[in-house]
Amino acid sequence: MGDKPIWEQIGSSFVQHYYQLFDADRTQLGAIYIDASCLTWEGQQFQGKAAIVEKLSSLPFQKIQHSITAQDHQPTPDSCILSMVVGQLKADDDQVLGFHQTFLLKSFQGAWVCTNEVFRLALHNV
């Protein structure tokens, strides 16, 4: 990891941390958001840490496992990091589904937080 740019290291570390928390106990994800954070989940929009955590906590499954296929990270001109993730997830006993997720990360009070997030299942012809 030492030879990757710092923004790529931060993005990769964030992605790993996010999915570990999400898969283990998504109610703990509040620490990565701020009150100004925005989430678009399958076209539904949520703003603020409380609304985002409420949405993620209320998703209709008991257990979930994410498998990351690819992730890409870019620095932005205003010192943020744009991260895009493609992967598969398995919720409860449902079939494995593909997904796409994008995060905008910002350094805030000494920690990297997610200010913007977009999630979509990779469903075709639905």
Image (cartoon, grey):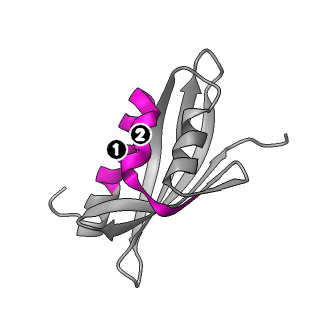
For the view shown, which residue lies furthest in the right direction?
A: 126
Q: Which mark is residue 35?
A: none
Compared across the picture, whether 43 is left or right of 27 comes to: right
Q: Is residue 98 above or below residue 8?
A: above
Report the residue at 28% width, 60% height from top. Answer: 10
- For residue 7, what is the image quadrant? bottom left
Report the residue at 36% width, 35% height from top. Answer: 20
Q: Residues within 10 Å of mark 1 (few under 14, many from 20)?
A: few
Label 1 and label 2: CA atoms lie apart by 6 Å
Q: Nearer the viewer, residue 77 or 46?
A: 46
Q: Where is mark 2, residue-wise? A: 19
| Percent position of residue 41, x then y | 65, 49
Q: Where is mark 1, residue-wise? A: 16
Kind of element beneath mark 1:
helix
Q: Nearer the viewer, residue 84 or 117?
A: 117
Q: Nearer the viewer, residue 122 or 102?
A: 102
The three-letter amino acid code for the residue at tag 1 is Gln
Report the residue at 39% width, 44% height from top. Answer: 18
Kind of element beneath mark 2:
helix
The three-letter amino acid code for the residue at tag 2 is Tyr
| Percent position of residue 32, x then y | 38, 52
Q: Magenta-highlighted stretch: main secondary structure?
A: helix
- On the rendered image, what quadrant is the C terminus found in? top right
- On the rendered image, what quadrant is the N terminus found in? bottom left
Q: Is residue 105 above or below residue 66?
A: below
Compared across the picture, whether 88 is left or right of 28 comes to: right
For the view shown, which residue lies furthest in the bottom direction?
A: 77
Give the residues drawn in magenta, as a range.
Answer: 12-38
> Disc 1, disc 2: CB below 8 Å?
yes
Report the residue at 31% width, 61% height from top. Answer: 112
